[in-house]
Image (tube, helix red, strand yellow):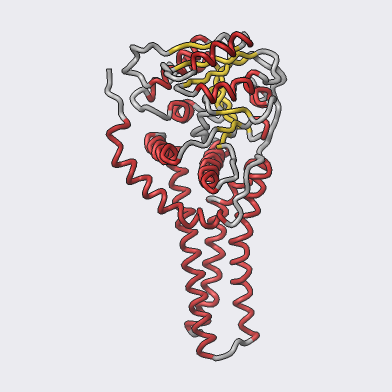
Amino acid sequence: MNLSLLLNISLPIAMLLCLLALWRFRWRDYSLPARWPETAESTEQPAISIIIPALDQGDYLAEYLPLFLQQDYPSFEVIVVDKASTDNTPDVLKRISAEDKRLRYLSVPRSARHIELTKLALTLGVRSARFPWVVFTRADCQPASPNWLSRLAEQFAPGVEMVGGYANYLNDASRQARRPIYERLRLQLRLARAARSGRPVCADPCNLAVKKSFFMAQEGFANSLLLPFGEEELFVDAYATPENFRLTWHPDATIRQQLPERRFLADERIYTAEIANRSSSRRRLYAVREAWATCFFYLFLLLMLTYIGERTYYIWQQSAYHLQDLATDLPFLLLLIAAIVLPLRTMRKATETLSERKFGGMLIAYAWLQPLRNRLTHLRRLHRSDSFIRPSL
């Protein structure tokens, strides 16, 4: 058997193995929202307190608070905790609370300096909550549906202490929004795979319901007091179990967040990397899983280019193309088509289920460039690591 024939047989086999690994470690996650079991086990609708920390976000509160107050749910309240805002936030809260008594607002003491303000604001909100369940979100967020609370409450089955929902940025149809939406969706899909496998490790901080008694029993965010971000993510990572944690992918249970400026998006990527670095080995395991998927992606590209180069050289030498060559070229062509179609089709199912924007061919480009972007984020994180830790008391 000559070298050319050996390559023609072995390269497609190696490419097939790469595709199978990519499906196992990455692409099958894309179909999770469409296949997620949305079992409404709880018919009760316990009263809920929505906790919203805010800092100089009066305009967002004026626009989005009415949407929270318009929830089609029998008993709930909204608690906004003002982190010493200097804009029109107090005026907005005073006006809306006068119109709707379900809105209450608190203020973080100006003397609070040793505890990160968001953690303190959320904790104050939970302590003042009148109802057994609390839902964490942010001032620049809005519910996708008046049934947002109802869909979360469907997961409040006996033994469940935490429920996470899907959250992503508002789609303004711009090129700037597409990549952050993709990255946030991919992160949640990867973490959903962990929950589906019986190892829940995280939830989006803009859409997380927690039973108040459970939060207080764990002493709130005591496990992350020195880190000035990542409170909800690290709380779920520390205390979630297959029995007490649920996820819902119902589109009505979605939260949409205002797309921040580019520099804030860069900070968010650094924070996400730092949170993952400080998380349990369960979450790091899924980071390794993603790294393996990237290795198989690049190996597939290398094998594809090698095959094309070998076949081009062979045809150039023969000065003709023979029909018997279809026996090896056709499998290669089918593998190449599968490598393009499979991720596009499975991701399309996810975007349709979540009413999310479509990524099309940019999905391949993101897979190609993401390792470089991750490396740059890692270097920036190392450069700023000293600023992540607040001084201890």
Residue situated in front as seen by the camera: 201 or 353: 353
Q: Position of residue 320 (x, y in %)?
A: 58, 90
Position of 14 relative to 362 (above/below): below
Left or right, 275 with reference to 167: left
Question: What x and y, as percent, mark residue 19?
Answer: 56, 60
Give the answer, above or below, for where 323 lies relative to 153: below
Left or right position of 276 against 366: left
Quarter the C terminus occupies: top left
Give above or below for 296 relative to 272.
below
Closer to us: 44 or 64? 64
Residue 281 shows in the view:
no
Q: Residue at 54% of width from left, 14% of height from top?
A: 93
Residue 295 seen in render = yes
- Residue 201 in the image, given as x and y percentages of width and height: 49, 34
Q: Residue at x 56, y 28 (%)?
A: 141
Q: Nearer the viewer, residue 355 or 159?
A: 355
Query: Relative to 227, is 301 on the left or the right?
Result: right
Query: x, y (%) of residue 99?
Result: 63, 10
Q: Please name the residue shown 46% across and 16% down the image.
A: 82
